[in-house]
Amino acid sequence: MVLWFVGRFLNSGLLYGLAWRNTRDTLGDCAVWGMRNCVRDGLSSAPAAMGVEEGKRSVGKTFHVHLVSDATGETLNVIAKAALAQFEGVDVREHTYLMVRSRRQLDRAVDHIRADPGLVFFTLVSPELRGALIGQCAEISVPCLDVLEGPIAAMGQFLGAPETHRPGGQHEVDQRYLLRIEALNFTIQHDDGQSPESLNDAEVVLTGASRTSKTPTCVYLAIRGIRCANVPLVPGLPVPQALLDATGPLVVGLWASPERLVQLRRNRLVVMGESRDTDYVELESVRAEVTHTRRLYDQHGWPSIDVSRRSIEETAAAILNLLNERQEARA
């Protein structure tokens, strides 16, 4: 639904005056995109009604996307980035309005939207503010989408319980929040092989050669509430005994192709102002290092992940899958 909506927005040039007004006259309530109305009325006829040929988009235009949230905007940012990642060669400017919890704050956001008309994504749990935003967007002829309306409606129907209309509920300082802070503190204390005496208290231990994204992956997992530590493997030095003795945590080995490691390490040396060639960036030495680490993983039965072309998020997702499988097997 979100992808289709963004695609029509980028392809059609609907935001420039009469084109959108004509579309709104044709589509009626669907032009304001209350999600239930669009699902109810059907989406199949919308592209034809818009009169836009599939696959074509406006070239040379700047599109404006407005994100209106009554909390931190994290949900909106993730959805907008995921949707926009599917479209290339378009110039999109994002405008973000956070902690919108009063009519005055909403009116100020709408003033900005009026100045730069564009697609509006919003997460407002207050029925009053939701209705006001949809109404004002209709008045200035811009499309808007409540990205949580469908999921909340489905969840309410599934649970058989009413929604609370409480903004930012996922960010409350509750026990889960405190556990995430605890996990982040643990990860900082156990970065780069520190505090080996309490390594066994981790849920996940990442190990690998230099420049295999151990630290950023640990931090990402900690933000998700996972107590994570990382232990570097250094050529010529023995494997830390604390790592070999760890029986509680899931140990995951990270590795990358020798060519990728050399590239990353050279970039690091440039940043550090170091220009000398050493075994650290010599391809054959790095190739031997990667072979040694992968054999170590196999020897100890540690699952391993190739991070050569993975983002931090993708690596973390793979680790979370491994952790879930391990926990299910122990249940």
Image: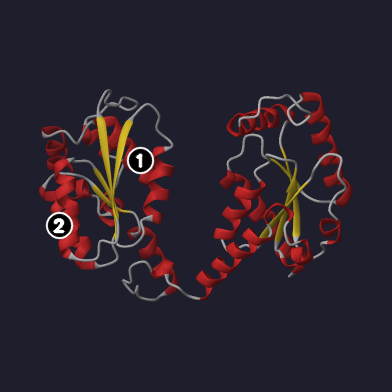
Q: Is residue 269 visible?
A: yes
Q: Quadrant of residue 200?
A: bottom right
Q: Nearer the viewer, residue 292 or 271?
A: 271
Crowding near the residue tagged with mark 1, few <14, some 14–19, many ≥20 C-alpha atoms within 10 Å: few
Looking at the picture, how far across and down is residue 245, in whole percent? 86, 61
- The residue that disc 2 covers is 107
- Kindly identify the amino acid type of the residue bearing the numbered disc 2: Asp
- Kindly identify the amino acid type of the residue bearing the numbered disc 1: Trp
**Element type at mark 2:** helix
- Tell me the CA gap for discs 1 and 2: 28 Å
Quadrant position of the C terminus in the picture: bottom right
Q: Nearer the viewer, residue 150 or 312?
A: 312
* 284 to 71, vertically: above or below: above
- The residue that disc 1 covers is 4
Crowding near the residue tagged with mark 2, few <14, some 14–19, many ≥20 C-alpha atoms within 10 Å: some
Q: Nearer the viewer, mark 1 or mark 2?
A: 2
Looking at the picture, how far across and down is residue 294, in whole percent? 82, 40
The residue shown at (53%, 72%) is 178
Q: Is residue 1 visible?
A: no
Looking at the picture, how far across and down is residue 21, in whole percent? 12, 39
The residue shown at (58%, 45%) is 312
319 with respect to 87 (left or right): right
Looking at the picture, how far across and down is residue 130, in whole percent? 22, 61
Q: Quadrant of residue 89?
A: top left
213 with respect to 107 (left or right): right
266 with respect to 11 (left or right): right
